[in-house]
Each structure stands twice: as structure tokens, then as C-alpha cells.
Amino acid sequence: MTNTDRDRAWAIFTARTILGIVFFIAGVYKVFMWGPLEHARQLFVVPYSDTFLPVWALWATGAAVPVIELITGALVLIGLWTRPSLFILGGILIFVSFGHLLVQPSTSINPYILPRSALLLVVLLLPAAADRFSLDGLLARRAKARV
Amino acid sequence: MGFETAWAVFVPRTILGFVYLFAGIHKIVNVGPLAYGQALAMTDGARFFPAALLTGVGTLVPFMEIALGVLVLVGLWTRPALHALAVLLCLIAAGYGVSGLLHPMGATAMNITIVNTFILPRAALIIVTLLIPAHADALSVDRLLGR
């Protein structure tokens, strides 16, 4: 591993770990302390009751998002199935952007969504193979050693 | 790589160095290293770690910040110093994550002000500096010493 490879691995590790912590902690809070249904009621159903969005969809997505954040946040944190998890989290960020902008000003996405998107993009734009300090990297090296 | 790239790495590295150098100096001058350690021992960390350990670590933190800040600022052993800062920042992010679960703030539990004004700007500076190849860092002591 060259010095440049090592530095790149550290850069990805930093971005991935912080991103994973942020989503995982949010998931733990929403699933185990708040409860997915209460999360759905408070953040999805009530605020969007006057919009064209169907209530069943608000309940379904509001209850699913915390669980997805919990699982994908944990996976990103340890670096396992990182890319699929990032794709899903990217989808959540787009989905939540839509939700925020539907009922709030354009600046409403600045505090939560844009910083997370920036971290996600750093990890996603760097080659997956460069993410050496991850379970994906460890498994890839083991598989390569077996061949 | 030319002067533009050297300047592109010099700017974030110097700002990052100043951030940690002055963070350490302010802790020593305004709070005092021992008082800072004792304050750390009175946080939620005391639920998980012995108070003596937290006091010891907290007392050392300002000096560690100054040492790492100076190294990054002048560009000496830059990459190992950046790796250490990355680990430090991830640990701090994890600490604030746990703190967020104990004292939830907002929908994502973690204090968004801490995440957006403390953790992410430092992470951005570390990541950008790491992603520019070390050999491009011409305006550094490392380069002067031919490392």
C-alpha cells in the first residue's frame, strides 16, 4: 500500500465513520427510544396531513425510515456492504429533501441533509477499493489471498 | 504538481493546524488543563469510564491538540498527525453520539450545532488535506527535509 493509498483510506474512514455514527445514532434514537410509529406520526403524518401525500404512505415511510437509518448507519459505520448502504441512504436523503422542501423553505435542508449528503458523496466518489479500513476491505483482501 | 496544488493543500492544512493549536491554547489559558480534565470527568463519560481516566485524558487533550496542531501547521510528520486527528475526531463524534442518546436534541438525537459547526468542518479539512497527495505539499517542513 502506497502512502497515497493509505491517506485515501484514512480520508474515507473519517467520512464513513462520522456518516455512520450520525445515521446510526439517529436510527437508535428513532427506533428504540422514540418508536417508529411515533416517529411516523410526529414527523410524517401530522406535518403533512394537509398535503396531497396519502396518509398510508406517510405512515409506511415514516415507520420505515428509522429502521433503514439504523441498519444502514450500522453497516456504513463498520464498512460492511458499504456501497449498497450508501445507495439506500442517498435515496433517503433525496426523499427527505422532497419532504422538507414540500412544506418548508429551501434553506430547511441546510442543517441536516446537506452535511450528510456531503459526507456520503465523499465516500461514494472515492473508489470502493480504497476503503481499506473497513469490513468490506478486510473481506476483499481475504478473498484475494485465497485465490 | 505545481504551485496551485501546493497552495491548495497549504490552505486547509494551515487552517486545520491553527484550529487545533488555538483550541489547545485556549483550553490551557482559559480553563486550565487539570480543570478541563476534571470537567470531562463530570460529563456523561463518567457513566462508562473511571473518573480518574477521564481526568487524565482530559488533562492531556490540550497538550495533544497543541502538539498535533503545530505538526500540521508547519507540515512536519503531517500524515501521521492527520491520521491521529482523524481518530480523535471520530472518537469525539462517537462521544457526542452517545451523549445525544442520553440527552436527545432534535429529531436525530445528536446536537446538530456540534455536528455542523465542530465535527464536520474539521472533518472536511482533514479529508481534503488527506486526499491531496503528500508529495504535492511543497510548502511544508516535510518537503524541506526531503520526506
Image (cartoon, rainbow, N blue to C red):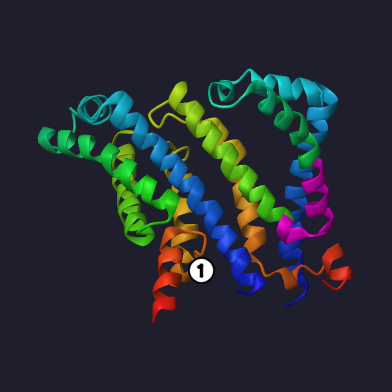
* Residue B82 place in picture, x, y as percent: 69, 54
* Residue B136 place in picture, x, y as percent: 74, 71
Residue visible at 75% across and 76% down in the picture:
B2
Identify the secondary structure beneath mark 1.
helix
Q: Is A21 rendered above or below residue A145?
A: above
User: Which residue ends up furthest to the right in the rendered image?
Assistant: B144
Asked if one can make out residue A90 in the rendered structure from this viewpoint, the answer is yes
Report the amino acid beneath label 1. Ala
Q: In which chain is the residue bearing label 1? A: A
* Residue B140 place in picture, x, y as percent: 83, 63
Label 1 sits on residue:
A130
Examine the image and state in which quarter residue A98 appears.
Answer: top left
Asked if one can make out residue A109 in the rendered structure from this viewpoint, the answer is no
Residue visible at 21% across and 35% down in the picture:
A63
Residue visible at 67% across and 59% down in the picture:
B129
User: Which residue ends up furthest to the bottom in the rendered image?
Assistant: A147
* Residue A58 place in picture, x, y as percent: 18, 35
Examine the image and state in which quarter residue B32 appears.
Answer: top right
Q: Which residues are magenta?
A: B66-80
Residue visible at 51% across and 64% down in the picture:
A132
Q: Main secondary structure of the magenta part?
A: helix
Q: Quadrant of the N terminus of chain A?
A: bottom right
> Is residue A77 found inside the magenta-colored segment of the image?
no
